[in-house]
Amino acid sequence: MSMKVSKESKSNQKTNYLTIILVVMGLIVLVAAGLILRTKPGEANEDIFGFTFPPNEINQPAPELTLFDLDGKEVSLTDYKGEVILVNNWATWCPPCRLEMPEFQVYFENHQDQGFQVIAIEAGQPENEVRTFVEQLELDFVILLDPENKSLVTFQNSSLPNSFVIDRKGNLRLAWLGAINEATLEQYVTPLLEE
């Protein structure tokens, strides 16, 4: 009889675990659907992510990194010394990465005259796919291709998206893991533009 109870108990545990997994998956789908439905294509939306975490504040020399842009031109992070740079590691297949790109575009348009630049480094997709994505969203900041994921190794972060801010002196100042929005950039990056 104890074996029978044991088998029934194991069966109930499996059913309970399966129920929990299904509920969690359902919640994930609902949250993702909510984000998609609240976002209008091509529009920046301050409330797109609900909230973003504050950045990690750091102060160390920025790493050196040289890659190629969509036209095959070699571009180095040091080419933009004297500007405040948002370095973003992203991929065309990454939903949070795709959502934050219009946010970056709006912030870039509002602050490029203050010496601000976005350098968005695409993690491994073919040039034609990246170009199509960039043209669809009308992104006009710097887009670099990274077929060997050198940036992820250099910044020691393989999760996408991730972002880093380099100040005018070439120091790494802020780091985020996950998507960020325009309001977050205003709060944390704009003060660096005023330094």
Image: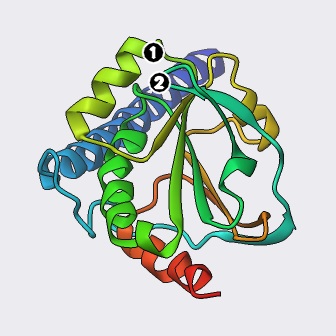
**Quarter of the view holding residue 133:** top left
Q: Amino acid at mark 2?
A: Leu
Q: Residue at position x 80%, y 38% from top? A: 154
Tell me which colouring the rendered structure shows.
Answer: rainbow
Question: Depth check: 94 or 2 in front?
Answer: 94
Q: Quadrant of the N terminus?
A: top right
Where is residue 24 drawn, in percent x and y? 39, 42
- Which SS class for mark 1? helix
Where is residue 72 drawn, in percent x and y? 55, 19
- Callout count: 2
**Quarter of the view holding residue 149:** top right
Q: Residue at position x 22%, y 63% from top? A: 45
Badge 2 or badge 1: first in the primary sequence: 2
Q: Residue at position x 27%, y 69% from top? A: 46
Q: Nearer the viewer, mark 2 or mark 1?
A: 2
Q: Which mark is residue 116?
A: none
Placement of 153 over or under 195, stated as above or below: above
Residue found farthest to the right:
60
**Quarter of the view holding residue 96:** top left
Residue at mark 2 to residue at mark 1: CA–CA distance: 7 Å
Q: Which mark is residue 70?
A: 2
Placement of 54 over or under 45, stated as above or below: below
Q: Amino acid at mark 1?
A: Glu
The answer to whether marks 2 and 1 mark residues whose Cβ atoms lie closer than 8 Å is yes
Where is residue 187 drawn, in percent x and y? 48, 82
Question: Depth check: 41 or 62 in front?
Answer: 62
Which class describes the residues within 10 Å of circle 2: few (<14), some (14-19), or many (20+)? some
Residue that badge 1 annotates: 127
Which class describes the residues within 10 Å of circle 1: few (<14), some (14-19), or many (20+)? some
Along the horizontal axis of the image, is 129 left or right of 33? right
